[in-house]
Image (spheres, rainbow, N blue to C red):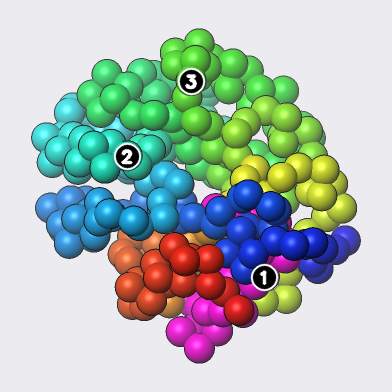
């Protein structure tokens, strides 16, 4: 296990490799009617966004939502990639259901790819996950695919998608986290870290950990899950302007 990835000549905001820029992957926001300011903030020029997840109602919903269509359209017009959330339920959802959800996302919201949330992480789940990815690429050959494990999976998953979410959890765990050796075989743009409960005073430390561990796509927030009763990722962090400035200019020291 490794606690840090050696970086030679990489800038503080470079995500751990020369030429790689750290940016935000937004795991999902509250509905545009409930959080219009959040969606507006994500379209501001120079915001370092890699992608934003569109989760209409635990997936694409049962019919097109004009508010979500408008929000997704404004993001795409701003040059931001929009990904539809597909809930794999840790491998319990049939592939046919996931593909049906993906089809609705494409037809209704013209998404640029998908996050396979709650994706299996063990070796046993790898074959079916690969079949699901093959089906998704058949729907959209250029789809950007992210596997939302939330932990480091079997290394075989790294060959199956564009990015892996290898950490999703609280700051109390992240600050002492380590990464397995196999991650060094892949560039930082392959990995995403989502961390909640990060105090403003520890923001620089959290950014350094992401850089050292080789994750170029991040989401850091001071919001918490309130003991498991809230989604800490559905709102912008309280220090949004500050973290945008730090990540956008490559400052994390």
Q: CA distance from mark 3 to mark 2?
A: 16 Å
Q: Quadrant of residue 176?
A: bottom right
Question: What residue is disc 3 on?
Answer: 142
The spot of residue 41 in percent (x, y) is: 24, 60
Say which element carries label 1.
Answer: helix
Label ID, residue 79: 2
Q: CA distance from mark 2 to mark 1?
A: 28 Å
In front: label 3 or label 2: 2
- Report the front residue among 116 and 89: 116
Pointer 1 local density, CA inside 10 Å: few below 14, some 14–19, many at least 20: many
Q: Quadrant of residue 190?
A: top right
> In the rendered structure, which segment of residues is drawn in magenta?
197-217
Question: What residue is disc 1 on?
Answer: 209
Is 113 one of the magenta-colored residues? no
Q: CA distance from mark 3 to mark 1?
A: 31 Å
| 76 sits to left or right of 207 | left
- Residue at 28 percent of width and 36 percent of height: 76
Question: Looking at the image, is 164 positioned above or below residue 239?
Answer: above
| 153 sits to left or right of 78 | right
């Amino acid at each position: 296990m490794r606690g840090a990835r050696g970086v030679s000549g990489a800038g503080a905001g470079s995500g751990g490799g020369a030429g790689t820029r750290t940016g935000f992957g937004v795991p999902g926001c509250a509905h545009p009617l409930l959080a219009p300011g959040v969606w507006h903030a994500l379209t501001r020029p120079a915001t370092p966004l890699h992608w934003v997840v569109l989760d209409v109602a635990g997936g694409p919903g049962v019919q097109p939502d004009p508010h979500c269509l408008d929000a997704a359209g404004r993001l795409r017009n701003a040059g931001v990639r929009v990904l539809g959330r597909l809930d794999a339920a840790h491998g319990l959802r049939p592939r046919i259901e996931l593909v049906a959800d993906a089809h609705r996302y494409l037809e209704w919201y013209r998404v640029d790819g998908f996050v396979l949330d709650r994706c299996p992480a063990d070796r046993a789940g790898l074959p079916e996950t690969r079949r699901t990815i093959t089906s998704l690429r058949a729907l959209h050959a250029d789809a950007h695919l992210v596997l939302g494990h939330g932990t480091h999976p079997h290394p075989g998953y790294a060959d199956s998608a564009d990015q892996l979410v290898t950490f999703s959890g609280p700051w109390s765990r992240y600050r002492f986290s380590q990464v397995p050796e196999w991650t060094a075989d892949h560039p930082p743009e392959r990995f995403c870290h989502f961390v909640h409960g990060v105090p403003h005073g520890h923001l620089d430390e959290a950014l350094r950990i992401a850089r050292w561990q080789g994750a170029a796509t991040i989401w850091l927030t001071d919001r918490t899950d309130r003991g498991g009763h809230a989604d800490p990722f559905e709102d912008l962090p309280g220090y949004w302007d500050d973290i945008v400035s730090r990540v956008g200019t490559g400052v994390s020291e």
